Image: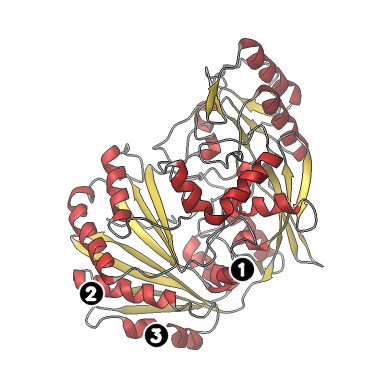
Amino acid sequence: MFRDLWTTTTANFFIAFILSSSTLVLGSTIHLDERASSSFSSCLTASGVKTLTSTSSGYATAALAFNRRLSYKPAAIVYPTSKTDVSAVVECAADSGVPVVARSGGHSYAAYGLGGQDGSLVVDLSSMKSLSLDQSTNLLSSQTGNRLGDVAQYLWDNGKRALPHGTCPYVGTGGHTSYGGFGLYGRTAGLLLDRVVSAEVVIANGTVVTASNTSHSDLFWALRGAAPSYGIVTSWTFSTLAAPSTLTNYWYTFSSTISNANAVSLIMAFQNFAATNPTKQLAAILNVGVSDGHMYIQMSGTYYGSKTDFTTAIKPLQDAFPANVGMKLTTKSRDWYTGLTDFTGPLSTSGPDIYDTFFAKSVVSTTAYDKTSVTNWVNYMIQQDKTWGSKLWWWVEVDMYGGVISQIDETATAYAHRSATLNFQFYGGTPDDGQDPWVGQGGIDFMNGLVSSLVANPSGAYPNYIDPTLTADQWHSLYFAGNFQRLTQLKTAWDPNNIFNFPQSIPLAA
């Protein structure tokens, strides 16, 4: 089955603080004695930063994960309003050996914004949402509590500026920027992290530094691909772009009773087209699933230009579609704002955020998969949906990479997947908008099979679609590839006591 996924600041001076019995650091278990626990509690109290602990009103709600399949109990959740506040609470945690994680939008698939384990200090940045655009340089300073919708709306309202980013308005700018930041505009303008010119970051000893190509350049390199392992970025500075004046959004739909053979042909056509690295102005997304026993296939995207030029750019792909598949094409000529909201919906983040109960995986590929592999994949989906179609709302999204992204060397930043042509996201959530409980290990096995039926040994994966079930060797390679060794060395240099620690944080160098 397929579902579209667009998916008080007064200090608490009387903290009845209860730490979990152990805290994970450096891959081992350390026990905080009563004196250390009391010291940590007293330090947070003295900081004057709003703090929630397990005995606080509101803690249970604040500790809920976006992915309700997962549940963790932070040692404390703090709500700083300034970089000075962030510095103070990081020092408290460092002195007591408590792992620290930042929460920007809280949409980590693995709930790493809650630590991904019990006993972490969660630094919730939702009260830090300053935005400032320098009209002379077009540089945007954005505190990390902002979400994508906040940034996009502000830029449009202040000179019709733009940045490349994803399509969910509630996603936080912290993790999204840190691990890539791919979206429809990415092939034309690069990843969101490619637009970063500097970052204000609180490092492990509580010091606030500004990292850029000319200041702490090694840290700046690591932040653009793995920031949460090195500090808490309190503000990004982005080089913005003039929003395109004209774009063309498009949607291809196909017959609801398409044959398996034609489904394979459509997927092959999309893959092979992506492998040619077509004009950077063209963005394309293939959505795949099963509906009523038949393959469901839809393709959509944006061409950053006129409808006439879109027609020329898309022609090689459309010509490769098989006959008699009920193809229908809808196009809309838009300005930047309307074109963006066609896919995001309203940009406002003032309402309550959604949540889901799900498991997801990803595959980043530099080549198209062969017909035998795609046929096996389609057959798996059709057969397995008979069991899982009523238990999970599942789908696969395939994004076309390349364009400007591939023009940047894979060692220029810590983000490793510059030569990719395709990014697959495999997503399975429970029915009733995720309110139903998770379906157990069988659901994870089914989702793993969605990958293995296509490719037995993937060469890459997208870290913003984080999979907490991967082994250490797997995620080291799949997420960071040839950049992993340097990242461990920089981890040792910038966070030698492994304060910024979660299950898939960069480890210290061996």
Residue 494: which quarter of the image? top right
Give neighbour class at mark 1: few <14, some 14-19, many 20+ (Cα, 10 Å).
some
As drawn, is 374 to the left or to the right of 17? Answer: left
Q: Secondary structure at mark 2?
A: helix
Res 262 label: 2
According to the image, label 3 marks what residue?
316
As drawn, is 357 to the left or to the right of 488? Answer: left
The three-letter amino acid code for the residue at tag 1 is: Ile
Q: Identify the residue at horizontal 51%, vertical 60% (top origin).
A: 167
The three-letter amino acid code for the residue at tag 3 is: Pro
Vertical order, 99 against 429 (above or below): above
Q: Earlier in the sequence, mark 3 or mark 1?
A: 3
Q: Identify the residue at horizontal 53%, vertical 35% (top origin).
A: 114
Q: Identify the residue at horizontal 40%, vertical 78% (top origin).
A: 273
The three-letter amino acid code for the residue at tag 2 is: Asn
Q: Earlier in the sequence, mark 2 or mark 3?
A: 2
Locate residue 240, reporting x and y percent. Answer: 69, 66
According to the image, label 1 marks what residue?
408
Disc 3 from disc 1: Cα separation: 26 Å
Disc 1 from disc 2: Cα separation: 36 Å
Locate residue 65, reporting x and y percent. Answer: 47, 37
Closer mark to the observer between disc 3 and disc 1: 1
